[in-house]
Image (spheres, rainbow, N blue to C red):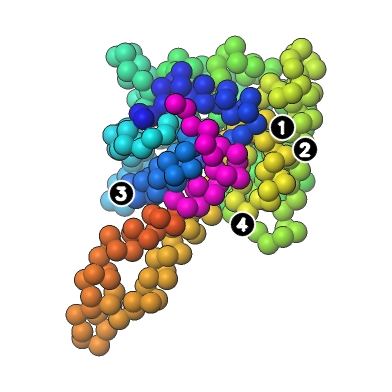
Amino acid sequence: MPIATPEVYNEMLDRAKAGKFAYPAINVTSTQTLHAALRGFAEAESDGIIQISTGGAEFLGGQYSKDMVSGAVALAEFAHIVAAKYPVTIALHTDHCPKDKLDTYVRPLIDVSAERVAKGLNPLFQSHMWDGSAETLADNLAIGQELLAKAAAAKIILEVEITPTGGEEDGVTHEINDELYTTVDDALRTAEALGLGEKGRYLLAASFGNVHGVYKPGNVVLRPELLKDLQAGVAEKYGKTASPGPFDFVFHGGSGSTAEEIATALENGVVKMNLDTDTQYAFTRPIADHMFKNYDGVLKVDGEVGSKKTYDPRTWGKLAEASMAARVTEACANLRSTGTKLN
């Protein structure tokens, strides 16, 4: 299957919301982690979303120049070629982009897709995220309006984060406190500013206690039932159906969540759940195991020559790919997307 067209991406999201399942959105930082994600989706027979954060794009751009746009474009072009060999449909997305990186990441990437669309092609990425959670809501939504108009013109879906997700990701940090819960008023102001689809489709990352990373039990209090209140409050004002509701929600900070928390989120309109921390560990864990077990092979200890078969990156890289793919497959099961791929 090719990368999703704008029409197919919309269909994917519609099917997820109607079927009360969500797509895992897997952060990747290399061609190898890209293949791991694709393999996981294929083995689960699930379509999915692959995303690149600003830090991931900088890493992909190489440590000499650290150019985020070059890194993101290069991997996206690579994905357009290799994804065709997997029997699932994939959407490409860019993750958290704060205000100070808009001009060096999201805006140029939207321009790349706009140029493609002007030539009769599909956009390079299917969606981009604007993370204005560190700004006032008024400023956040004002920038969101500008980006939504540009994205819609390029046949791209925008993701907006209106209130903070706790923890740290790519240098964006928020405390874990009572501010991590979106209010109905926040949701109403969002609908007023961005509309409910008539100005362009957007995904909404609302906060219900979400925290990036993995924490021990008791440190994070998720309240996914809050999403139902947000849907109902906006639906009542705009005369929309309260269930599944007017918003397409995104679940940030999903690593380590319980099955019950995920199920509640799905029932209340979550169509996308980000996964990064757990897949990072799944990728790295077998590499560490290989290195420990083959210490004298991967290193030239005491003047010896080591073993090329053990330090060859393909040897441990295959283990890492398989492990991360298995974690992606597990995520599909948790989010009920297993077996739902488009024909």
Asked whether residue 30 is in view, the answer is: no
Residue 85's x, y, as percent?
A: 31, 36
From the image, tell me which residue sits under label 4: 214
Q: Is residue 233 left or right of residue 80?
A: right
Residue 118's x, y, as percent?
A: 33, 13
How far apart marks 1 and 3 lie (CA) works out to: 40 Å
Q: Nearer the viewer, mark 1 or mark 4?
A: 1
From the image, tell me which residue sits under label 3: 62
Give the residue type that dot 4 points to. Answer: Val
How far apart marks 3 and 4 lie (CA) works out to: 28 Å
Do labels 1 and 2 touch, CB within 8 Å?
Answer: yes
Give the residue type that dot 3 points to. Answer: Gly
What mark, if any, has residue 225 been given in the picture?
2
Residue 155's x, y, as percent?
A: 44, 18
Please report whichever mark, 3 or 2, sits nearer to the chain's N-terminal start: 3
Q: Which residues are magenta?
A: 325-343
How far apart marks 3 and 2 lie (CA) works out to: 42 Å
Please report whichever mark, 1 or 3, sits nearer to the chain's N-terminal start: 3
Q: Nearer the viewer, mark 1 or mark 3?
A: 1
Q: Residues within 10 Å of mark 4 (few under 14, many from 20)?
A: some
Q: Residues within 10 Å of mark 3 (few under 14, many from 20)?
A: few
How far apart marks 1 and 2 lie (CA) works out to: 7 Å
Against 40, is 214 above or below?
A: below
Residue under the point 45% across and 14% down: 153
Q: Is residue 106 left or right of residue 187?
A: left
From the image, tell me which residue sits under label 1: 268
What mark, if any, has residue 299 been given in the picture?
none
